[in-house]
Amino acid sequence: MTAAQPRGHESGTAAAAEAEERARAVAGRRELTYAVLLCVAGAGLAFWASTRTWAVELTARPTPLPPVRDARTGAGLLPWLPALALVGLAGGGAVLATRGRSRRLLGALLCGLGAAVAAGGGYGLVAGFDGEVSRHWPALCLVGGVLAAAGGLLTALRGRRWPAMGARYERPARGGGVPAARGEDGRVTGRRTTEAWDALDRGEDPTVS
């Protein structure tokens, strides 16, 4: 009984470490989903709103001719706005394919792009355009930029520990990838297993000593 207790304790410790690692992986995958949705939905909304008519300029003509109506979209008034929104849309998808420090840098870039798009929407709200003005499209562009910036900020702060595209949590002892670290008695040790997964998150090969 005395000899079996340490082994049982080691097994319980390894199981607890594995359960904790699994919970971390699930939480990271959930945060990743939220960030991508925020970036893609926000950038997509901003791009769509930028293609709508923000203002209609009226040019008077001699009577009895009616004035000439010149519809101006957000893209026509701010040509850089839809371009930034498209970059943010592509960057939101790229979050899935990056990992580690690269993902955090991408998140910072997306946060800046979202802030710039939101600023464009804010400008459309306060600018004094000639003629008839539609304020709801710039407002939607502002909302989209804020959502994209929030997704980028979340990625910059938390993205380093999120899994990459296609990464799945599996017990190393069962998978065909990186072998789990084992103790002298042949049992998988929870601490070394956690270290191996941390190394994978950093893009390192834990099998290379």
Image (cartoon, rainbow, N blue to C red):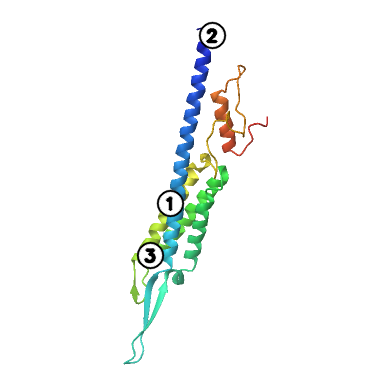
Q: CA distance from mark 3 to mark 2?
A: 72 Å
Direction from residue 114 to residue 105 in the image, left or right = right
Q: Amino acid at mark 2?
A: Ala
Q: CA distance from mark 1 to mark 2?
A: 54 Å
Q: Identify which amino acid the numbered label 1 is placed on.
A: Leu
Q: Measured from the top left, where is residue 181 in percent x and y?
A: 61, 25
| Label 3 packing within 10 angstroms: few (<14), some (14-19), many (20+) | many
Q: Residues within 10 Å of mark 2 (few under 14, many from 20)?
A: few
Q: Nearer the viewer, residue 70 or 194?
A: 194
Query: What is the secondary structure assignment of the residue under circle 1?
Result: helix
**Tag of residue 38:** 1
Q: Quadrant of the C terminus?
A: top right
Residue 40's place in the image compared with 31, above or below, is below
Res. 31 in view: yes
Between label 1 and label 2, give the one nearer the viewer.
Answer: 2
Would you name the residue on which mark 2 appears? 3
Q: Secondary structure at mark 3?
A: helix
In the picture of the structure, the residue carrying the numbered disc 3 is: 138
> Of discs 1 and 3, which sits in the foreground?
1
Of the residues shown, which amino acid type is indicated by label 3?
Pro
Estimate the x, y position of residue 56 in percent, counting from the top left.
Answer: 37, 76
Q: How many marks?
A: 3
Q: Quadrant of residue 131?
A: bottom left
Q: In the rendering, at what x and y percent does residue 51 appear? A: 43, 68
Name the residue at 48% across, 64% down: 82
Image position of 11 with respect to 69: above or below: above
In the rendered view, tell whether residue 34 sits above or below residue 5: below
Q: In the displayed structure, would residue 72 be above or below residue 108?
A: below
Q: Earlier in the sequence, mark 3 or mark 2?
A: 2
